[in-house]
Image: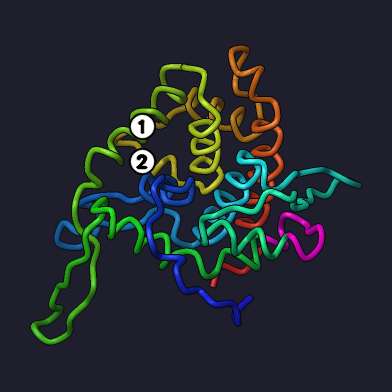
Amino acid sequence: MSGDDLTGLAVPQAEPTLAEDLMLVLFQPGSGPSGTGVIAAEGVLLYALAGAVLAELGMRGHVRAEVAGGVGRVRATDAVPADPLLRRAWDYVAQKPRGVQTVLAAVGPQLREPVLERLVARGDIERGVRRAFGLFETRVLEGDGGERRAALVAAVRAVLVDGEAPSERVGALAALVSASGALPQLHREIPWGTAVAVRAKELEQGNWGADAAAQAVARTMTAIIVGNVTIAAAVLPKG
């Protein structure tokens, strides 16, 4: 998909996408050199962001997920997404039904910068410049993520630590954060331990709790996608 027109992908829409929420939660303020921020799970970020895009397409009814022969696949519906970030992935799936891992590998590599630029444009993350050895300028990430990051982390923590039943969006977000392998790095905000690890794995597998029965489609869709994100993170190239 390297020849795609990427114009407009970095322009924020009215509502943040799930991919934006995921990157914002993975943003770790003050964890980089000289108090700068870093994005956790950089090595697998492209698969996690692509999984977030697919999960949102599923929750909004733009694609359907299915399992055939043990392989997760997605097919496009007639509902065309307006957001160009989502539309690009939908266009790819609309050509023909695709394996989830195929979509992750095709869509993911060009998501990081547009998603990050949206967060910068919204004021959630700031860009700065640091000078190394008094000579070389390096672009860095700054800020604390603002109120929106704090609210997202609190919602994920409530599900993982306090046992609250998640909404569709928070359930998918928590499952994707878990699949990225970043939860231990978020220990300061979401205390890491056996109980959290078990709950996170349940969310990955679509077990969101008895109160989430009405979210069967979202749970199933997320489980299929997140399972493939986990596989991709383990076996596909991370370059």
Disc 2 marks a residue whose amino acid type is Leu
- Residue in the image at 77% along x and 65% along y: 95
- What residue is at 81 percent from the left and 62 percent from the top? 96
Instruction: State the residue in front, 223 or 18.
Output: 18
Q: Position of residue 145 (x, y in %)?
A: 25, 47
Q: Tell me if 113 is positioned left or right of 207 in this view.
A: left
Residue wearing tag 2 = 186
Label 2 environment density (alpha carbons within 10 Å; few <14, some 14–19, many ≥20): some
Which quadrant is the C terminus positioned in? Answer: bottom right
Residue 88 - label: none
Task: Looking at this view, name the residue that lies furthest to the top.
Answer: 210
Distance from disc 2 to disc 1, alpha carbons, whole Å, reads 6 Å
Residue 124 vs 158, above or below: the answer is below
Name the outermost residue toward the bottom: 135
Up-down relation of residue 117 to residue 201 (above or below): below
Look at the magenta stretch and give its main secondary structure: helix
Is residue 185 toward the left or the right of residue 94 in the image? left
Q: At which x and y percent is residue 85?
A: 52, 60
Going by the numbered disc 1, the residue's amino acid type is Ile
Q: Of helix, strand and loop, which one carries label 1?
A: loop
Determine whether 137 is above or below 182 in the image.
Answer: below
Q: Is disc 2 in contact with disc 1, using a CB cutoff of under 8 Å? A: yes
Q: Which residues are magenta?
A: 94-103
Q: Is residue 198 magenta?
A: no
Expressed as whole percent of the image width and height from the top left, the position of residue 234 reads 63, 56
Horizontal and vertical percent position of residue 102: 72, 63
SS at mark 2 in the image:
helix
Residue situated in front as seen by the camera: 130 or 85: 85
Q: Is residue 126 left or right of residue 205?
A: left
In the rendered structure, the answer to whether residue 168 lies left or right of residue 150 reads right
According to the picture, the residue beneath numbered tag 1 turns out to be: 190
Q: Quadrant of the N terminus?
A: bottom right
